[in-house]
Image (spheres, coloured by chain):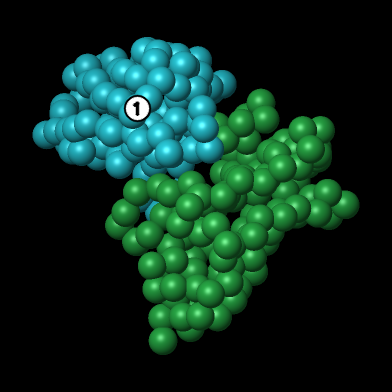
Amino acid sequence: DIQVTQSPSTLSASVGDRVTITCRASQSISSWLAWYQQKPGKAPKLLIYKASTLQSGVPSRFSGSGSGTEFTLTINSLQPDDFATYYCQQYSSYATFGQGTNVEIK
Amino acid sequence: EVQLVESGGGLVQPGRSLRLSCAASGFTFDDYPMTWVRQAPGKGLEWVGFSRSKAYGGTIQYAASVRGRFTVSRDGSKSIAYLDMNSLKTEDTAVYYCARGLQNSNCLDFWGQGTLVTVSS
């Protein structure tokens, strides 16, 4: 099974900051990686798929990069609505989620 | 508008069974794969199982943690996906989400609101 390791588990940031979250796969998954945002009590929301393709309706301050085993999610100019938990997910073989990153207010 | 509505959750004793349903609307159900994901209280997301669209043979995959106990199925005539859960364990306690797959994959572009399953004596 493909394992996915996400870091950090918690990230403290302020409005306007640029934040980066990293995801590492245990073997190459090409670009078959997605990023989701989840707020308390709500279902996850797809932000980015195929490592760097922005889902329709998602603000352009979100961006994704990487291929193979190393991936990043970057949020430019963090907004109040962005404080949430973020998950990466590989979907190259079955599916596996990262452990999540809680982006909290500094 | 794409909508996914789960139902069937509740309190169940260990060892018993439960069936979850996911009613889909707003898209051609047979053209899309459907996936089940769960989230234990205060924990992260765990992929449970997946059924491919009819166009791709309707094949099914399961996570190792549920293989042999859970069954994913779908009824295209009703646009409903099902998750049959047998031999339930306390560690199966979670919110269960159904979600639609993007481009015949486990990348999930629309999610239901979730239904809580509590396994406890």
Q: Quadrant of residue A101?
A: top left
One can see residue A42 in this view: no
Picture coordinates of residue B113, whole percent (x, y): 54, 53
Number of numbered discs on residues: 1
One can see residue B110 in this view: yes
Name the residue rendered at 20%, 25% in the picture.
A15
Picture coordinates of residue A13, whole percent (x, y): 16, 29
In the figure, the cyan chain has which letter? A
Helix, strand or loop for disc 1: strand
Q: Quadrant of residue A96?
A: top left
Q: Is the residue A94 above or below the residue B81 in the image?
A: above
Name the residue rendered at 44%, 66% in the picture.
B92
Residue A95 or residue A28, whichever sits in front: A28
Q: Is the residue A25 above or below the residue B74 in the image?
A: above
In the figure, the green chain has which letter? B
Picture coordinates of residue B67, whole percent (x, y): 55, 57
Name the residue rendered at 53%, 74% in the picture.
B87
Q: If the image is split into quadrants, where does the N terminus of chain A sit? A: top left
Give the residue pinned by disc 1.
Answer: A25
Q: Amino acid at mark 1?
A: Ala
Picture coordinates of residue B36, whole percent (x, y): 57, 50
Would you say A91 lies left or right of B53 here?
left
Residue B66 or residue B54, whichever sits in front: B66
- Spot the residue most to the left: A106
